[in-house]
Image (tube, rainbow, N blue to C red):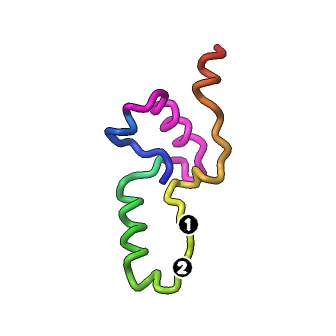
Amino acid sequence: AGPMRTLAGSAVGGARQVYRWNAQHSPLQRNTQLEDVGGTGLYLLSDLSAAVTGEVVHVDSGYNIVGVPDLLRNRDDS
């Protein structure tokens, strides 16, 4: 999954910048929600995915195809 707002994630330095950047630049223009990951899990457990094998499923609003800048480095340079 891409960046998700979680209790653990809030402890990561620069997390708010990453969430903001992802919501603005990911192809779906939003952050991944817990329901997105859960829905994908339900799909993979259902008969609808019976022919899906050996796949990496990215549940990340397109985050995996976007080059993410080093937000912390950019912040320190200013």
Instruction: Identify the residue at horizontal 54%, vertical 48% (top origin).
Output: 29
Magenta region includes residue 57 = no
Q: For residue 13, which numbered disc appears in the image?
A: none
Query: According to the image, label 2 marks what residue?
Result: 53
Q: Residue at x 52, y 80 (%)?
A: 52
Residue 65 location, x and y as percent?
65, 53
**Which mark, by number, is residue 56?**
1
Residue at the left extreme, as displayed: 7
Extent of the magenta region: 11-30
User: Which residue of the protein is positioned furthest toward the top in this rendering?
Assistant: 78
User: What amino acid type should be assigned to the residue bearing mark 2?
Assistant: Thr
26 lies left or right of 32: right
Q: Kindly indicate the quadrant of the structure image that contains residue 78.
A: top right
Taking 75 as reference, is 57 above or below it?
Answer: below
Q: Is residue 22 magenta?
A: yes
Q: Quadrant of residue 35?
A: bottom left
Mark 1 secondary-structure assignment: loop
